[in-house]
Structures are given as C-alpha cells and as structure tokens.
Image (cartoon, grey):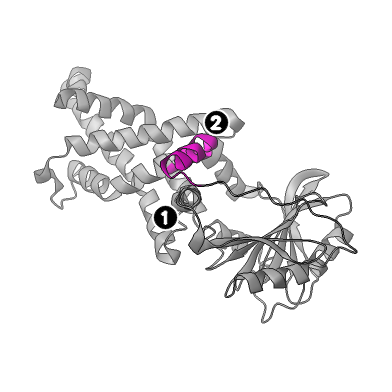
C-alpha cells in the first residue's frame, strides 16, 4: 500500500510541480494586489483627511469624463484609497475609475489587466485561456489536494526533525503547509464550479429562501445616492458603504453593501435594499443574521484569498503560498539524486 501511495505522490508531483510553482508565487503576490496597485498608481490611491464628495458627485465626474461608458458599481472610499471607485464597461476593455473622495475631482483610471500584475492575475485564474484554463486550474488545484493527502499518509515522524537536508525540508514544509494547500485547493475550485459549490452549501445547510422583493413603483423623482446611502447606514449602524450596485433596472431596489471591517475583509458585510424613489428600506440582510449556507458561500473566496484574518491572515497566506515552490524544489533534488543513483527503476519504487 505504501508503494502505491508513493507512486501516486510521485506522478502527481511530476505532473503538478511547475503548476504549483506558478500558482504559489502568483497567489502570494496577489494577496497584496491592492497595495501593489497603490504603489503602481500613487496618483489614484491617495488618503484624504475627510470624505466630503458624495457618490452622486463621483458619478457625475465620471459621466462627464467618460461619456458612453456605463458604471456597474461604485465602491466606497476607505482610509487607504481616499477615492470612490467605479467599474466601467463601454468602448473597449473594462476599466476602474477613481474620484477623489475629498474634492470629487476625477483622479484617473487604470485597466485591471494591465502590466505585470494583470499578467499574474490572468496566469493565476485561467492561464490566459478563458474558461478552458479555469477548468484546468480547478482540476490541478484538486490534484494538489490529493498530492498533499498522499504526502501526509506517507509521512513518518522521525523524518520531521529540523535539518536542512532536502528530505527533511520537504517533509517539514509539507506538514506546515498541508492545511493551506488543502483549503486553497478546495476553495480555488469554487471559481471553476461556482454553482456546484453554491448548491452544496444549500444542501448542507437548508434554509428558507427569502421572498422576492416587490417591484419598485416610481413615485416622483429618483432619490440621490447620498440619501440612500445614509438610509443604509441607519439600517446597519456602525458600518461604512462598501459597494453600490448600479446594474439594476429602474424598477429594481437599489442594493447597497455595507462593510463591518476593512475593505480587505469583503465577506464581513451586510446588504440593504432601498426603494430608489421613496428612500425606504425594502430589505436588510445583516451579517449577524446571515443563513449558514450564505455564510459558507461567502467564505469560499475570502478564505482562498486570505481575507479571513486581517493583516495577519493575509501575511500568513502570502508566506504559505511560497511553500509550493519550496516543495517542488526539494522534491526535484530528491528525484535527481535517485535518478543518478538508481536510474528510472529506483525512482519509481
């Protein structure tokens, strides 16, 4: 049985080695994508002393500068960005546009896929191959989970002593990173088979589906975004606006997402639906009252991205991501030694 496990571990390691290096390095870098973006675009992300510009002013500045473009969402400013950010689609590739939260003056824009950071994002998500690459990524991530499990089953405690030999380093790093690889491999597949994960969460934790929101009836003029944001803040005290959904039709309630923590912990949010003509709250989904299934669905992406434990969690995920190239490097040394000593037959058994 041990020989079978070893051969499975060996074959998976050979097939997935370079994949693990690429996904580990790019994942570690992408944990800090916002900080890197701020470093690359210092003129776009500048803190402000006070948020005075309203979301309406931000959208007006954007509409004037980018006629013919449509804003899908408007993200609220936090301490580090000092800007309202809109995600635009229209004449060409989608872009993120930033408006100074203090003055309401347009700062500029950038396209998320630009530069080496965009290259890493495409590499990490789908290997530049769209849906096909995303499916391959999902299977490879689950393959890394199986690789880790076979490694744990092969583990013998005496080999975990702290030495700088390749075998000991491989075993120790593998033990330290085992939970990380399993968790990120399983949650990473969520981005490939999104609906299957959602269905699984609802199967594990059945709950009553909320009734559909009533259709909005236009009464007078549409209220300002600033007024509706204030209504959402009163509905969920102690929060800040995280995102305003602008994809709805005129007959839809306006969905406003309010954050309870930093913008990095995007899963710690409540949702408020506001009537756009009367500014009345139509529904509130508070974080504390979130059904178990919805809580689990929110954890898939946040855990995968290291957004679960503040700055400590992000740093831990960035460091553990680098364990993958270390595991491949030490395993390559072990393979090479066996090939030189015993040939292919010795490597196999």
- Region in magenta: 187-207
Q: Is residue 217 visible?
A: yes
Which residue is found at the position 49% from the left and 53% from the top?
291
Residue 322, given in percent of the width and then of the height, sits at: 38, 49
Placement of the N terminus among the 4 image quadrants = top left
Which residue is found at the position 29% from the left and 38% from the top?
148
Q: Does 40 appear above or below 122?
A: below
Residue 23, given in percent of the width and then of the height, sits at: 45, 41
**Residue that badge 2 annotates:** 133
Residue 285, given in percent of the width and then of the height, sits at: 58, 59
For the residue carrying disc 2, how many other residues have a C-alpha within 10 Å: few (<14), some (14-19), or many (20+)?
some
Q: Earlier in the sequence, mark 1 or mark 2?
A: 2
**Residue 318: numbered disc:** 1
Q: Main secondary structure of the magenta part?
A: helix
For the residue carrying disc 1, how many other residues have a C-alpha within 10 Å: few (<14), some (14-19), or many (20+)?
many
Across the whole image, how many numbered discs are drawn on residues? 2
Q: Does 49 appear above or below 156?
A: below
Give the left or right position of residue 66, taking residue 42 as reference: right
């Amino acid at each position: 049985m041990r020989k079978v496990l070893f051969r499975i571990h060996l074959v998976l390691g050979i097939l997935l080695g370079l994949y693990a290096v690429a996904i580990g390095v790019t994942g570690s870098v992408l944990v800090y994508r916002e900080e890197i973006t701020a470093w690359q675009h210092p003129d776009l992300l500048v803190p402000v002393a006070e948020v005075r510009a309203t979301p309406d002013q931000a959208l007006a500045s954007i509409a004037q500068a980018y006629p013919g473009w449509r804003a899908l969402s408007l993200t609220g400013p936090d301490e580090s960005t000092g800007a309202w950010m809109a995600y635009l689609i229209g004449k060409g590739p989608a872009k993120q546009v930033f408006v100074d939260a203090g003055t309401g003056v347009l700062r500029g824009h950038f396209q998320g896929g630009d530069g080496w950071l965009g290259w890493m994002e495409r590499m990490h998500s789908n290997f530049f191959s769209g849906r096909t690459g995303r499916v391959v990524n999902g299977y490879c991530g689950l393959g890394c989970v199986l690789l880790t499990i076979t490694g744990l089953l092969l583990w013998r405690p005496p080999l975990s002593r702290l030495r700088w030999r390749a075998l000991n380093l491989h075993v120790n790093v593998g033990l330290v990173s085992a939970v990380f690889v399993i968790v990120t491999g399983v949650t990473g597949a969520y981005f490939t088979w999104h609906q299957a994960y959602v269905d699984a969460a609802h199967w594990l934790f059945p709950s009553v589906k909320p009734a559909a929101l009533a259709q909005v009836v236009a009464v007078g003029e549409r209220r300002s975004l600033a007024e509706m944001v204030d209504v959402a803040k009163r509905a969920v005290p102690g929060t800040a606006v995280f995102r305003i959904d602008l994809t709805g039709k005129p007959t839809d309630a306006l969905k406003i997402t309010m954050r309870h923590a930093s913008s990095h912990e995007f899963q710690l949010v409540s949702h408020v639906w506001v009537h756009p003509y009367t500014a009345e709250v139509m529904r509130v989904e508070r974080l504390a009252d979130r059904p178990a299934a919805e809580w689990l669905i929110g954890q898939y992406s946040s855990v995968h991205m290291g957004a679960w434990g503040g700055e400590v969690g992000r740093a831990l995920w960035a460091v553990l991501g680098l364990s993958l190239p270390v595991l491949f490097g030490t395993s390559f040394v072990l393979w090479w030694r066996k090939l030189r000593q015993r040939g292919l037959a010795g490597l196999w058994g």
